[in-house]
Amino acid sequence: MTRLRNDRVLVIGIVIAVVSPPLLTLILVRLPTLEARAYVFLYLGIVASLGLLTGLIPALVAAALSSVLGDYFFLPPVDSLSLANPSDVLYLVIFFATASAVGGVAALRRGAMIEARRLTRTLAEANAELERLYREQAASARTAVRLAQTQQQISVLREADRVRRELLQNVSHELRTPLASILTGATLLLGRSDVSGAVRDGLTGIVTQSRRLDRLVGDMLDLARIEGHALELRLEDINVGDAVEAAVGRLKQIRPTRAVRVSTESGSLEAVADWDRIGQVLDNLLVNADRYAPPTSPIEIHVAPGARGTIVSRVIDHGPGVDVTLRDRVFERFVRDEHSDAEGTGLGLAIVRGIIEAHAGRIWLDDPVPGGGAVFAFTLPAAPVDAVHADPAVTDPASVS
């Protein structure tokens, strides 16, 4: 690009060198006759200007052309290239040498100026590169500082998480140990035959309230783990239908008269989940359904493959349903139906939501079915097809009495 620009300047300079001396001569011949040697400075100005602006070659061309024109038009005999006075030969030689020297000096000056501009650009580019490197270095330093701060924050969070886990374990131990002692002692006293009726009633109340307090402590600790993101899951491929049957069996131990109908649709019911935690979800939902369902109405559980690789489960209680004012808050902590006589801590559904969401699932209050009642539905991620080894289980709707 620079070479092309220099070539263009050289061509323009030669054109000007060819045109300028004749134009100057055309002007001078129309002026009153003066001493010819007085015009030398005008020609030298053209030569010097060309040398400074376009280089040495145009300056030499202008000097040569100026010498010829000066000889022809201004030195006797006029209109002839011959010289009448031998000293004029020396004059022309001196003029050409002087013009060439002036043009050469101007050309050197121009070269120095071009080199100075090139060096200026080089320095500017170097400064820009240094500034860029400085900015990158500063950005790298800031990134390093932010990374160090992030690592420090991660370390602090890990330490806080460790402390929280230890605190939960200590709280669980410190609270449940005396509760277990109270429950064990009261149960042993109830087994004695010499306990009077009034004392027995009191011991029965102690046992009942101790168990209720133990459940409350367990629920609070579970909720603390969930909200503190300290819930540990042992994920494996489990059959949700089997988990439902196991939960129904546990409900029958405490409520032998409660009828439960379980139905599953064809297809794989294998999910990636923690068996114990999903059992806790089902236990809470079944206890909640048993609490609100009429004694003569069965609890229904439906399990089926869902859309987008999920397993969908629904628990239906055929009770009075969830009050309209509570539908949007039913999964929040300590939310209870004030118009119901059913007992509860108000933490069960909040824990259920936390466990399901920890499994990357979703839980919601579904639309009521014909006959009324609350319908709690939740999803779990289905196990990959190639990881399922058991044949899909199909259970016809049956009453568990």
Image: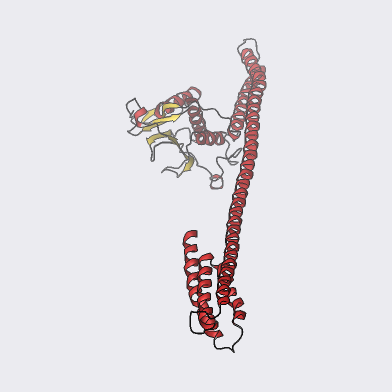
Q: Is residue 178 above or below residue 235?
A: above
Q: Tell which of 170 and 94 is nearer to you.
A: 94
Q: In which quadrant of the rendered view does residue 46 lie?
A: bottom right
Residue closer to the observer: 346 or 309: 309
Count of marks overlaid on the render: 0
Q: Is residue 135 visible?
A: yes
- Residue 43, given in percent of the width and then of the height, sits at 57, 76
Work out whether residue 1 can be spotted. Answer: no
Q: Give the image's coloring scheme.
A: secondary structure
Left or right: 265 as drawn, with respect to 115: left
Vertical arrangement, residue 216 with respect to residue 202, above or below = below
Residue displayed at 62% across by 38% down: 144
Give the percent coordinates (x, y) of residue 31. 58, 88
Instruction: Give the percent coordinates (x, y) of residue 349.
Output: 54, 36
Q: Position of residue 157 (x, y in %)?
A: 63, 32
Could you say which quadrant of the image residue 159 lies in? top right
Horizontal side, residue 370 vs residue 284: left or right: left
Give the answer, above or below, for where 245 lies relative to 102.
above
The image quadrant where one finds the C terminus is top left
Name the residue located 49 percent from the left edge and 66 percent from the top edge: 10
Q: In the image shown, does 124 or 180 lie closer to the viewer?
A: 124
Where is residue 146, by image quadrant?
Answer: top right
